[in-house]
């Protein structure tokens, strides 16, 4: 159902945060039963706008109209009362509660002073039937897969009689199959008259599902298009403000010797469960081996074991012919390992340290940065200035704490530190997660450059597009095992998607 | 509570009772000793049970409260002072004086809870520091006022400790008191009885009511609660105040139910042992109660052994020193806190101030 009846209208919304104009006279409207995508890079102001619509922030100026009437939201309660529901990027579910408890929270049904779980559970069943959102009301959230948790979030809004559903980056955490399911659910909801605002930075998805697309950049609305009148390249240009090379330019691989060899590796996770099971692979100089897989299938533990951060309980790791199984990170770094960790803020940087100190974290004890156990500030200063320029880190000074930088620039600091040493092996885990298109482009270029310089690259990513764009060979990880290894030319999105979901494809 | 923990608790209590039975059985029948041990256990577990419940309310809503010890101590003092003042200066009967004392103790606890909430929720002071402030404050205030009011010349009591109005009387609960043998165990004083009742109420409130659902939600994932329109600060404030009031009732136990006097530092670490009981009980009211009973049994051992001191066989002579037996509750605390019995999971947002 898609009529022209406008049910929500935003006029001239402006929101100023200290130092940033997050929303600058934003106009936006939503029609009944419409799927309206809001596209933009990180920091473009999409989430700010939605938080204003959901009553979490109050705008400095501008107005919101619901069915033509001006409304003011001072808290999410007001927005919920106006039929607006939001599914946040990080789910707002309580892991130890049941589905029913989560759905009723804040809007409980009470009988004789006690919670009436039975009535709510019945309502949940009815809603899940009506909209095709399969879920068990008695299940505990932490036992459910992410895709199902998302359904719970959607039911939570429908339980509150939402007519407008805001989905903030809903596909970021899903497998390709789960994305398919979500898209089915979204079109079903729109058929039944629910209007949907779909926030994303993924161009393909937008074109696949949206009725209209509004693009934001630097807090402003750049324009609104229908999928028919635009394409990926055009949308990307609108988002970034300049032409973007979406396709990674890369020639054929010039393979060298085997640099990195992993044999029958098994690793336990924090809880003592086997997270990585009997994994073997090789990476040659001058090639990129991509490890695809949905997050949480053992990639984190695998990379930790490969970089000396976690001791494997079985198997061996050889780097350039030396056995480095259970070695500590330093000898591996000295041999030529570069590591771009999964969580740049937790494991990549010391956030409270200045950029300059972060740039010498691996080499601070070596000449010329240290002499007789004393840090040589002059050498550090020169080095930091040089790298900041070379890697285009946007910072007013190399002495600003790393925490003050944007995500893209933080990642550039890590890349600068890791790749400006003599590198033989690069292990990059989710190197572009949460970055904007411009930064992604830059990081991808750097990775391909390293490969062309004869570095062996192990790329771990949950983004299928990234894996397919960069890899020369692709291994798929599922439940701690590598279930298949393919040449990049043999791999298709669909095939990889099935493997990532644990389904074996028939050998073609 | 998982079965291992339950068995552990039962085993420790049986061992502790068994020791007393072994020593005393030549003089008194085992049944009498067991009943006496159990009755003492329930009685002395009272402040621990209440303290642990206080902790359950605070921490389930996401606020760590190590100030329970201080809340107990301050409440013990002010409750006792109120009772004496009413009884000796204003001439009230002992029982109304004592009951008003209990109310004053609860209010004292509630006010200190408010202070803790104010520090840790509004000002986001580190909660451990906030709790420590309360502990130090309580020691200072109760010690100082105790000296000023009772021992200084020219104070209201004329520098003489007045005759106390006694302690709260035992009450007989209809039906339960009529049960042979077991009835005796539950013939307790009112605060001990109310502790048991509060365990049941706390369980129902936490797990079966709207209030409890919201309390647990703000302790696990406050932002999620916020997005569905729950006022995180308000929930936390009230739960910390309720926790404080329960700690206040625990304080009343010391001076209005256990002994008719106040001594500086008389809570003697019981507030901290309550926190151990809360953790061992996995932040649930019944679990906390069971754990409090273990500590209670350890203390009951010390008390009951005194009756049979002369009967202790010479090879166990060390048991004659009550100071050694008195260590048992503290040793148990240490053993239990080292986590020998399974792992416990605190509420996820426990101790983390909520930033909007």
Image: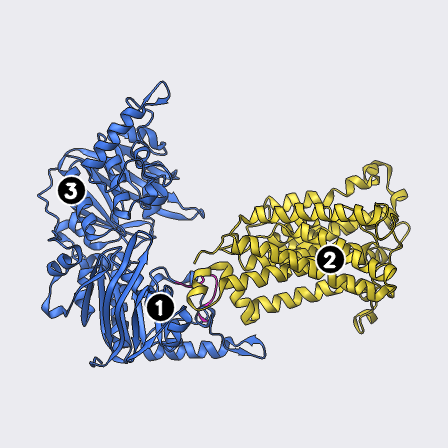
Left-right relation of A156 to B169: left
Q: CA distance from mark 3 to mark 2?
A: 69 Å
Mark 2 residue crowding within 10 angstroms, few (<14) / some (14–19) / many (20+)? many
Nearest the viewer among A139 and A3 is A3
Going from the N terminus, do you reach mark 3 or mark 1 first? Answer: 1
Q: Quadrant of residue B199?
A: bottom right
Q: Chain of mark 3?
A: A
Tell me the residue that label 2 is attached to.
B46
Q: Residue at x 15, y 57 (%)?
A: A236
Q: Residue at x 36, y 18 (%)?
A: A372
Q: Is residue A147 above or below residue A255?
A: below
Magenta residue check for B279: no
What hue does chain B carry in this figure? yellow
Give the overall secondary structure of the magenta segment. Answer: loop
Judging by the rendered image, the residue that carries numbered circle 1 is: A54
| Viewer can see residue B1 | no
Screen quadrant of the C terminus of chain A = bottom left
Distance of label 3 from label 1 (alpha carbons):
42 Å
Residue that carries the numbered disc 3 in the rendered image: A448
Which chain: blue? A
Residue B343 in picture, x, y percent from top left: 55, 50
Q: Secondary structure at mark 1?
A: loop
In the image, A424 versus B190, the foreground residue is B190
Closer to the observer: label 3 or label 1?
1
The quarter in which the N terminus of chain A is drawn is bottom left
Compared across the picture, whether A109 is left or right of B275 comes to left
Total count of labels: 3
In the image, which residues are magenta? A92-100
Chain under numbered label 2: B
């Amino acid at each position: 159902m898609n009529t022209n009846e406008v049910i929500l209208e935003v006029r001239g919304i402006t929101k100023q945060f200290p130092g940033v104009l997050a929303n600058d006279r934003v106009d936006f409207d939503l029609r009944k039963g419409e799927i309206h995508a809001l596209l933009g890079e990180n920091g473009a102001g999409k989430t700010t706008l939605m938080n204003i619509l959901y009553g979490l922030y109050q705008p400095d100026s501008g107005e919101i109209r619901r069915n033509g009437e001006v409304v003011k939201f001072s808290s999410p309660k007001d927005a919920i009362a106006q039929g607006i529901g939001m599914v946040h990027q990080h789910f707002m579910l309580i892991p130890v509660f049941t589905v029913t408890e989560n759905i009723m929270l804040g809007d409980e049904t009470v009988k004789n002073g006690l919670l009436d779980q039975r009535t709510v559970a019945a309502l949940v069943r009815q809603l899940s039937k009506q909209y095709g959102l399969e879920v068990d009301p008695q299940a505990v959230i932490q036992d459910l897969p992410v895709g199902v948790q998302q359904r719970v979030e959607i039911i939570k809004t429908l339980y509150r009689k939402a007519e407008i559903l805001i989905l903030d980056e809903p596909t970021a955490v899903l497998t390709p199959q789960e994305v398919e399911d979500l898209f089915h659910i979204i079109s079903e909801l729109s058929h039944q008259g629910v209007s949907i605002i779909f926030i994303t930075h993924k161009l393909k998805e937008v074109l696949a599902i949206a009725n209209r697309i509004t693009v934001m950049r630097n807090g402003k609305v750049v324009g609104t298009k229908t999928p028919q009148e635009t394409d990926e390249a055009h949308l990307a240009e609108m988002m970034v403000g300049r032409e973007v090379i979406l396709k990674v330019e890369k020639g054929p691989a010039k393979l060298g010797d085997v640099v990195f060899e992993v044999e029958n590796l098994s690793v336990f996770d924090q809880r003592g469960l086997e997270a990585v099971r009997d994994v073997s692979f090789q990476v040659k100089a001058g090639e990129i081996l991509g490890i695809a897989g949905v997050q949480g299938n053992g990639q984190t533990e695998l990379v930790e074991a490969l970089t000396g951060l976690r001791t494997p309980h079985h198997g061996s790791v050889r780097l350039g012919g030396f056995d480095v199984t259970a070695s500590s990170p330093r000898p591996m770094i000295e041999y030529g390992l570069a590591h771009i960790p999964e969580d740049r803020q937790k494991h990549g940087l010391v956030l409270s340290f200045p950029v300059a100190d972060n740039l010498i974290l691996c080499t601070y004890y070596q000449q010329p940065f240290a002499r007789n156990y004393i840090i040589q500030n002059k050498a550090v200063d020169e080095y930091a200035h040089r790298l900041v320029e070379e890697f285009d880190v946007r910072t007013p000074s190399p002495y600003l704490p790393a925490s003050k930088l944007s995500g893209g620039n933080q990642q550039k600091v890590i890349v600068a530190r890791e790749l400006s040493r003599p590198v033989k092996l690069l292990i990059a885990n989710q190197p572009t997660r949460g970055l904007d298109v411009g930064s992604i482009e830059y990081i991808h270029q750097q990775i391909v450059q390293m490969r062309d310089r004869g570095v062996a690259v192990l790329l771990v990513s949950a983004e299928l597009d990234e894996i397919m764009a960069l890899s020369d060979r692709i291994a798929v990880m599922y439940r701690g095992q590598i279930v298949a290894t393919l040449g990049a030319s043999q791999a298709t999105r669909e095939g990889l998607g099935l493997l990532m979901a644990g389904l074996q494809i028939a050998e073609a | 509570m998982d079965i291992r923990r339950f068995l552990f608790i039962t085993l420790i209590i049986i061992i502790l009772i068994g020791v007393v039975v072994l020593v005393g059985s030549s003089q008194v029948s085992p049944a009498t000793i067991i009943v006496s041990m159990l009755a003492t256990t329930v009685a002395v577990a009272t402040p621990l049970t209440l303290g642990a419940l206080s902790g359950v309310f605070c921490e389930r809503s996401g606020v760590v409260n190590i100030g329970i010890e201080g809340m107990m101590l301050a409440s013990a003092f002010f409750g006792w002072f109120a009772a004496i003042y009413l009884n000796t200066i204003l001439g009230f009967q002992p029982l109304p004086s004592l009951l008003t004392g209990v109310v004053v103790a609860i209010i004292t606890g509630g006010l200190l809870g408010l202070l803790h909430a104010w520090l840790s929720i509004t000002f986001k002071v580190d909660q451990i520091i906030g709790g420590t402030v309360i502990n130090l404050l309580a020691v200072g205030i109760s010690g100082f006022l105790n000296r000023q009011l009772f021992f200084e010349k020219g104070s209201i009591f004329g520098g003489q400790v007045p005759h106390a109005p006694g302690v709260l009387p035992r009450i007989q609960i209809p039906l339960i008191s009529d049960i042979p043998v077991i009835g005796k165990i539950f013939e307790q004083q009112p605060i001990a009885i109310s502790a048991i009742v509060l365990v049941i109420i706390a369980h129902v409130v936490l797990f079966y009511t709207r209030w409890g659902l919201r309390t647990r939600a703000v302790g696990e994932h406050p932002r999620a609660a916020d997005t569905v329109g729950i006022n995180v600060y308000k929930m936390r404030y009230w739960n910390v105040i309720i926790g404080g009031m329960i700690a206040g009732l625990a304080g009343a136990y010391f001076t209005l139910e256990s002994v008719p006097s106040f001594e500086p530092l008389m809570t003697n670490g019981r507030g901290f042992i309550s926190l151990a009981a809360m953790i061992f009980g996995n932040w649930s009211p019944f679990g906390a109660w069971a754990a409090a009973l273990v500590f209670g049994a350890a203390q009951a051992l010390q008390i009951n052994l005194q009756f049979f001191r002369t009967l202790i066989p010479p090879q166990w002579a060390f048991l004659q020193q009550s100071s050694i037996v008195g260590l048992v509750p503290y040793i148990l605390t240490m053993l239990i806190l080292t986590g020998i019995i399974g792992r416990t999971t605190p509420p996820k947002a426990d101790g983390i101030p909520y930033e909007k």
